[in-house]
Amino acid sequence: MVGLLYLFSCFAVAMTSALAQGVLGAYNVDPSSVSISGFSSGGFMTVQLGVAYSDVFNVGFGVFAGGPYDCARNQNAFNNCMFDNTPSIDIPTANMKSWSGVEIAHVSNLRSRRIYMQTGSADEVIGPNVMRKLKAQLDQFTNSKELTYVTTTDAAHTFPADFGGLGDNPCDTSEPPYLSNCNYDGAGAVLQWLYDDLNPRNTGSLSGRVIPFAQSGSYGAPGMDTTAYLYMPASCEDSSTICKLHVALHGCTQAYGFIGDKYINNTGYNMWAGKS
Ligand SMILES: *[C@@H]1O[C@H](CO)[C@@H](O)[C@H](O)[C@H]1NC(C)=O
């Protein structure tokens, strides 16, 4: 079972959630089973967290349409890390090495981390060239057997699923909510890459509940939305059951205030989180 935590990371306008928010409770999570993935700006932030906190995200991480670690600061213009450009990874990669074990967790951890990457072949917002630069960077630190790189043919800048959620776009369309039926189960692919022996996907009604919590205090940071959401499978409510934890980061304009619960529902992560 995988509990899913949605932390909202985009450095766009944070909008107040309509749902009441409380303090995140304590749950029975195996601290050696933690991973993270994200799309677009959430993909970039996943790389930041997966590298800098490789000790916390000790299973590994998954990147949908993101780019290299420490990319944007080290270009002539930050948008070298977007629009299918080819950003330089020289300074970012040198920084990973010089910060290792000092400013960030030891990059040697990355040798035993599982890494998943996905790009749409028709993504013009971030794009395959930026993702190839991420791969070239991570190849210097990771184990090739633990790394997979997926290209989704004709997919635009959009989170790929294999079902059509309410309000989603066609796969070749790059518009809000940036969620599409691309005949590819991205959430399943990343979770299955990261974890062995997952329960089959639940395509029926879900047993769990979505718990909003305040991203303040120790769960807060500048640029974060006010509220994040934890998907709690019913089987994880039992304190004798130890669950895994996966964190999912949305992209720009996918915050609750923009698209409501579409990222929570239409990515398909929750269908993999628990049995019916
Ligand atoms: C998301 O799922 C919840 C729970 O099943 C449902 O109430 C809500 O209408 C769904 N929203 C969308 C956009 O599908």
Image (cartoon, helix red, strand yellow):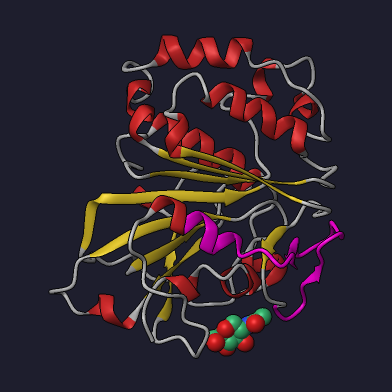
Say above or below: 239 vs 12. Answer: below
Asked whether, in this view, residue 122 is left or right of residue 81, the answer is: right
Residue at image position (60%, 10%) is 91
x and y percentages locating residue 34 in the rendered image? 33, 50
Residue that protrudes farthest toward the front in the picture: 145
x and y percentages locating residue 243 in the rendered image? 26, 65
Quarter of the rendered image showing ligand 1: bottom right
Say above or below: 9 vs 15. Answer: above
* Occupied quadrant, residue 15: bottom right
x and y percentages locating residue 23 in the rendered image? 34, 66
Depth check: give the residue in front, 219 or 265.
Answer: 265
Residue that protrudes farthest toward the bottom in the picture: 205
Q: Is residue 234 visible?
A: yes
Depth check: give the residue in front, 142 or 223.
Answer: 142
Asked whether, in this view, residue 131 is left or right of residue 198, the answer is: right
* Occupied quadrant, residue 1: bottom left
| In magenta stretch: residue 170 | yes
Residue at image position (74%, 21%) is 87
Residue at image position (36%, 34%) is 54
Q: How many marks?
A: 0
Residue at image position (75%, 60%) is 178
x and y percentages locating residue 117 in the rendered image? 59, 43
| In magenta stretch: residue 192 | no
Q: Is residue 11 visible?
A: no
Q: Where the C terminus falls, by quadrant?
A: bottom left
Asked whether, in this view, residue 251 is left or right of residue 110, the answer is: right
Tell me which segment is drawn in magenta. Answer: 165-191
Say above or below: 63 vs 18. Answer: above
